[in-house]
Image (cartoon, rainbow, N blue to C red):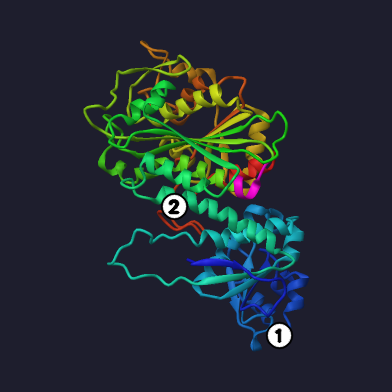
Amino acid sequence: MLKSVRVGAEGGARPAALVVGVFQGEKGPSGLDAGAKKLDTAGAIAAACKRGECTGAPGSVVECFPAGGAPAARVLVLGLGKKDGFDHHALHKAVQQAAKRLASAKEKDARFELDGALAAGKIDAERAGQSIGEAFGLLTFDTNQFKGSATPKSQWPTITLRPSKSAPAASIRRGLALAESVNNARRWGFTPPNIATPNWMAGEAQKLARGIDTLSVRVVRGAELVKEKMEGHLNVGKASENPPCLIRIEYKPKKAKAGARPVVLLGKTITYDTGGLSLKPTNFMAGMKGDMCGGANTLGAMHAIATVIKPNFPVVGLLVAAENSVSEDAYRPDDVLTFRNGVTVEVTNTDAEGRLVLADGLCWAEAKEKPACIIDMATLTGGVITALGSTFAGMWCEDDKLRGKIESAAKVTGDRVWRLPHDESYREMMKSPCADIVNSNPNRKAHPIQGAAFLSYFVSDKTPWCHLDIAGVSDAETEMGTIAKDTPTGWGVRLLAEYIGSL
């Protein structure tokens, strides 16, 4: 891990560490690009490329220490994978391994020289520098923030990244700024539920907006939730001593494009989920502080949009925040709820609560925001983990243009999505014998699709809409590059920022 990352001045003294790249299958020093060969005045890099462990496999690192320290005291030969598959995502994954190695070695500064590799993969230097900044920035996430006096304090190093032709200073700074937004989201998702209540999340949104003149925050709570007919919030949250709220964050550019309608980003923000009266088994309740990651990541994306992307059209973030708890006031299976748009819902399972608050968010977006499109993000179902594991988020989107933009953004950022079907037969599965629909069909067939089918009743056919179920990708079960084990990933922050930047 790193304490902080700085960006050095252009040129300057020889760096302590140098990173060059080699592709898989390229034999010996011939795999080095011309720039790296030119720097290899002592022949140490070429010698390292001849070693058996220098395979060029993605993220592999082979080190050498040139005599006299030229071109650097430490050189990392970074495996970039196969040349024909080299893209932004491959570069980002490889750079993460170099960042981890340099952090563990406590190097004070480093420079990347990847000109030839970028040319081979048709990746521009701005994107490469951004990937480098993101990788190093993600290593500054503090996993020990809740450790106490029984844990020795860690002494993490600070590293300076020296710009180069293949990693300009401005692009490194952009990557570091995006990593800050991701780390904000990770911090919120990592915070224990006795601290991270709905009201705390509202306060975090307000703190985030201070000093950013294009961001404003409104919190809807109490009697105003009743007035606005926010039935999902009111019922899911009424058993908790921590009352629910809707957190609205608006990005409004200084010079907006005439007539531009807002993009609405909607995040499920269940700050803790016991399952309610449909109580979760003990082994399934631990970790439910992460049920607010959809909202945390949406808020992180709003920070990135306001500070890095700065589009010329408005963007609205909606965090539907509640705690699903148990008390004599808890809503029950068999209750029938009437939502703002008139749809009635029979509650069959109080542990299918996220879709109830998301329904409120969709109704609000339709009625209040007049959106250009809506993208919701939620840790909605265990079923999507069964279907897709922790590799892809489930995506439901019937609008070709919106879906294409999301898929393109996913390819660049590595926040990967897999399209799952919408179909009228799934909507039929949700029909209730005593209300319009049930919140969960007890037969569990097509479980993640049920969630999307339910939500479709609360968004107009005329509104482009994308639903992202991030239950499998919101948390790192194992170490994932620069994401530590058992910490939130911030999945979707960079994806949404990239999407907004593409419009």
Crowd class of label 1 (few under 14; some 14 to 19; many from 20; radius 10 Å): some
Q: Earlier in the sequence, mark 2 or mark 1?
A: 1
Residue indicated by mark 1 = 42
Residue farthest to the top? 434
Residue occupying image coordinates x 47% and y 59%: 141
- The answer to whether residue 22 is above or below residue 468 is below
Residue indicated by mark 2 = 187
Residue 388 within the segment the image draws in magenta: no
The residue stretch that appears in magenta: 305-311
- Image coords of residue 255 (percent x, y): 70, 39
Residue 307 within the segment the image draws in magenta: yes
- The answer to whether residue 123 is above or below residue 159 is above
Residue farthest to the bottom? 68
Residue occupying image coordinates x 30% and y 42%: 285
The residue type indicated by label 2 comes to Arg
The residue type indicated by label 1 comes to Ala
Residue occupying image coordinates x 38% and y 50%: 191
- The answer to whether residue 352 is above or below residue 312 is above
Q: Considering the image in quadrants, where does the C terminus appear?
A: top right
Q: Secondary structure at mark 2?
A: helix
Marks 2 and 1 sit apart, C-alpha to C-alpha, by 45 Å
- Image coords of residue 307 (percent x, y): 61, 49
- Image coords of residue 21 (percent x, y): 67, 67
Residue 440 visible, this orientation: no
Nearer to us in this view, 127 or 219: 219
Q: Which mark is residue 219?
A: none
- Image coords of residue 444 (percent x, y): 39, 27
Magenta span: predominant SS is: helix
Residue 484 sits in quarter: bottom left
